[in-house]
Amino acid sequence: MNVRGISVEETEVLVVGSGGAGLRAAIAAHDAGARVLILTKGRFGLDGATVAAEADMAVDSASCARRFGLPGDTEDSCDAFLRDMIVEGEYLNDQKLARRHVEDAPERLADLVEWGASLRELVLTPGHSAPRGVWIPGRDLASILRKQTQKRAVPVREHTFATRLVKGDDGLLGVLALDASSGEHVFFRGRAVILCTGGAARIYPYATVSEYLTGDGLSMAFDAGAEIADMEFPMFLPYTLLSPKAVRGIPFTHDVTNYLDAWALNREGVRYMRSWDPVRMERTTRDVNSAAAGVEILEGRGSPSGGTWLSLAHLPANLIAHSAQWFPESLRNWRYGGIDLGAILPDLSREAVETIPAAHFWNGGIRIDEKGATNVPGLFAAGEGTSGIHGANRISGNAITQIFVWGARAGASAAEYSRGVGTTSPDMEMIERFVLDDLKYLEKENGVSPADLRRKIRKTAWNNAGLVRDEERLRTALKDAKTLAASAELQTVSTRRRIFNREWLCAISNTRMIQVLRLTAEAAFLRKESRGAHFRRDFPETDDASWLHRILMKKSPSGDVTIERVPVEFPYFVPEGGKRPYGRKGGGHSEKKTKRHHPAI
């Protein structure tokens, strides 16, 4: 079907993204009786963060023991899991969403077992009071989800780059996308749309994730009127490799700190984590580790390449050599993601390696309810880039749990929603304006290079809205965001070819990255305290007396940003309040006894 030269395709539930959350949502929507179509920037089931994850899925330890035969702690519970999430999330979690998360987790793991997953082992990771990390390599998860999606014959449009959410008077109508294989725009009309587009870690120069994670979904949702929350809490993964450059960003060294007694050192040889968490040291949570490294770097005590040092040299050489035999499969024999790091890294029994916190996960994003629905009728979201579940900091394993719990919830809810609404014709003149806005980068003879602009975006994000913030830096970030947005309008590409023109896609995506940078800096500027993944050197304390609020952002009719401070609700766990040093978590809380929930076992 063609309307004014723009191709139109129809479905009932449209899923944007084919990572773990997208495929799990598609499976759930199909199983609920809806016609489903998946759009993905890259190749089916191979883009996004899931396939590259060497990770664990967090499930309460009692369920791991009783339902799945793993060596779990039968004294653990969903209540204890929830408590850890709230404490480590610094009490900014939406506790009702977090409760759904922990209670649904065993059922979603049972799905995986039914679909053929092999549960390798159970690990105890930072932030958890019991072993809850069910180790399943990301490549296995991605393979299982691909097979289940193919079994259901859910159609997938590969190399299809969503550029706009299209609204009508009563809600969302569908998605405008650019088919990179043809160079043409297509309007995908859906009764419900599920955004599973991940976070925006790639606004930073150091990141552990795919180049595709540039915040497109967050920005599109914001433009469509969706509420965005907690944008000041991008999560950094400490101790990722910085040098040698060939392995930069690989998190092998971070994962090793879960198994060996690694020391984080500044250039003076000082084990600097003593000043931040003298009990847990390098095994504290990732937010505190990253902020600590950021301060060492900023204050000139870093390594030659701009990071800090991680050392195993205090351990006996034969102990280090033996560890390669008992590490989890994904780390065993000093291999990671198919790379033989033993042949690249120095002798770790004699030398330290340079590491740096790298952008890893987006704790904030699109605000959803317990069904995965947003405030925009017809728009749902799941996975990374949604807000409320993790609060100010995510603990290990919960990214994978989030994929399966919230993908399933959003998929079933979107299918139900699609049955109750009719099909509305879009405003094709508006769609044409969107298309022309994308095409403008092909028409300019001279202008700004998209690649150069992207480097500038990442530089200002890292320097001014990254590991360590203060008022001066955040003012600079906001000023730079305006300058970068003006430059984005002047972008031009070196070739007019429309098919698989990566430079053109880069230009379109840059505008989204700049908007995410602005929203991040706005929220960070407003939050005058340090909490979780947000560390302000000029406000170094955590202030429960004044800042137990979430920062909610929405696009105004004039196109500006409206910002609201929303008090956090405490249906289950209530903090004591007051001020406390940053990083000193679990500073006390009361538990509402009438609201206890028992493990789903």
Image: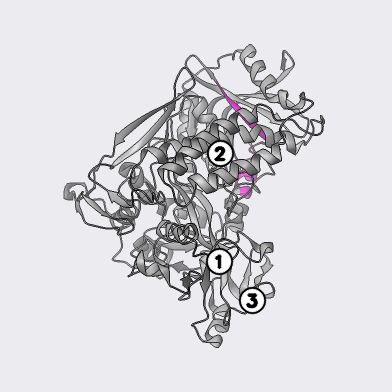
Quadrant holding the N terminus: top right
Q: State the residue at coordinates (28%, 42%).
A: 547
- Type of residue at label 1? Ser
Where does residue 143 sit, x and y in percent of width and height?
A: 63, 53
In the rendered image, which quarter is residue 335 located in? bottom right
Please report contact status of discs 3 and 2: CB closer than 8 Å, yes or no: no
Residue 562 is left or right of residue 51, and the answer is: left
Rounded to the nearest angstrom, the CA distance separating label 1 from label 2 is 30 Å
Magenta range: 146-166
Quadrant holding the C terminus: bottom left
Q: Is residue 297 above or below residue 5?
A: below
- SS class of the residue under badge 3? loop
For residue 218, say whether it is visible: no
Residue, disc 2: 215
**Residue 152 within the magenta-colored segment of the rendering:** yes
Foreground label between 3 and 2: 3
Residue, disc 3: 346
**Residue 447 within the magenta-colored segment of the rendering:** no
Where does residue 525 sit, x and y in percent of width and height?
A: 40, 39
Where does residue 116 sit, x and y in percent of width and height?
A: 56, 58
Sequence order check: which comes first, mark 3 or mark 1?
1
Viewer-nearest residue: 398 or 216: 216
Sequence order check: which comes first, mark 3 or mark 2?
2
Sequence order check: which comes first, mark 1 or mark 2?
2
Q: Is residue 503 above or below residue 127?
A: above
- Type of residue at label 3? Pro
Rounded to the nearest angstrom, the CA distance separating label 3 from label 1 is 16 Å
Viewer-nearest residue: 56 or 121: 56
Residue, disc 1: 303
- Type of residue at label 2? Gly
